[in-house]
Image (spheres, coloured by chain):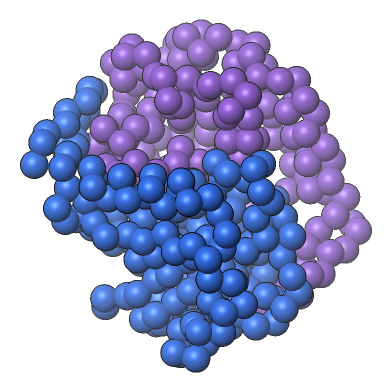
Chain colours: A purple, B blue
Amino acid sequence: MARSIRVLRVGQRYVRDDRTLTHLCLVSRALGAESIFIGDAEKDLVGTIDEVNRTWGGRFEAVLGVPWRKVIQDAKAEGRCVVHLTMYGMPLQDKVGELRAEDRLLIVVGGPKVPGRVYHQSDYNIAVTSQPHSEIAALAIVLHEIQSGEELKRPFEKSRLRILPSPSGKRVVET
Amino acid sequence: MARSIRVLRVGQRYVRDDRTLTHLCLVSRALGAESIFIGDAEKDLVGTIDEVNRTWGGRFEAVLGVPWRKVIQDAKAEGRCVVHLTMYGMPLQDKVGELRAEDRLLIVVGGPKVPGRVYHQSDYNIAVTSQPHSEIAALAIVLHEIQSGEELKRPFEKSRLRILPSPSGKRVVET
């Protein structure tokens, strides 16, 4: 199935979460999402992602300036399944079968402050363990599980550099 | 199989990577590792982890002050399989069968500056995609794959609080 997966960051704390947001963008890109909505984050981040695309391929997009309410509203209007990641949600392993049946998803990644309506407007509230850890790790495992690991084999088109996997060194070629 | 998994952080940049290190500790704990070696990081972090244990259970340990060379040396001396995570390594999906056969592992999580000898001393150099993303995400997926998802169901003993999974809210009970 050719799935369309988008990611939305909600509840970002400024400055302190800058690196977390960069990780979320890069994880979304590397693990098969097509875009991430990052609210009013620094424009620098869009430049960083564009540079990663030029070097390592693909057409992943970081989208600035769309309020999160509208991102969720638009997703629901087009029948996209909205999946909010929270340690309070239902265990991923119990719901992953249903999630795999969806061909269009919006994964909502909460920060420290997530408004209650995100819980109520989402089609699923999903927990990757009920323990506190990292929204970056939760996003990675959810993307990995929904795509059954197929995302690890995904090619990135039109890259400038490419890594040749190596058992004990670094091999990079220009393409 | 009752596996023993430990984690080692190498190549940390101070200050800037503080939150990354906190995420690495919490992910290791939540996803079934028994300890993480964090070099000379702030002592505060050990206190944070102890507090998480008291509240949410389990006996996960953050170990300060052991040089990474000694952590790797000790691991090899006791026959522990050393797995270094790097985007230059062999694809996880090609090696996960071999990794699952190991009952004692040390997962080495590189930071921006990883000495070459880490590549050579490791039994495996493993890539979670050959794309740049996040060491937090890579660690999460490797822990998840090695344990075949069983880590998501793991109980944490003697917690003060426990979450009751909920489809649309937050339910926490004292235990």
Residue B97 higher or lower than B26, as above or below: below
Residue A90 lies left or right of residue B125; in this view the side is left
- Residue occupying the point 47% across, 9% down: A69
User: Which residue occupies the extreme left position in the image?
Assistant: B175
Instruction: Choose between B30 and B70: the one closer to the eye.
Output: B70
- Residue occupying the point 53% across, 66% down: B65
- Residue occupying the point 32% across, 23% down: A123
Where's residue B61, x and y in %? 36, 61
Instruction: Choose between B52 and A20: the one closer to the eye.
Output: B52
Instruction: Choose between A24 and A157: the one closer to the eye.
Output: A24
- Residue occupying the point 10% across, 36% down: B174
Residue A32 higher or lower than B92, as above or below: above
Where's residue A139, x and y in %? 47, 40
- Is residue B100 in view? yes
Where's residue A168, x and y in %? 71, 78
Residue B94 lies left or right of residue A53; in this view the side is left
Q: Quadrant of the C terminus of chain B?
A: top left
Residue B139 higher or lower than B47, as above or below: below
User: Which residue occupies the extreme right position in the image?
Assistant: A174
Instruction: Choose between A149 and B135: the one closer to the eye.
Output: B135
Residue B64 lies left or right of residue B90; in this view the side is left
Q: Quadrant of the N terminus of chain B?
A: bottom left
Label total for image: 0
- Is residue A34 in view? no
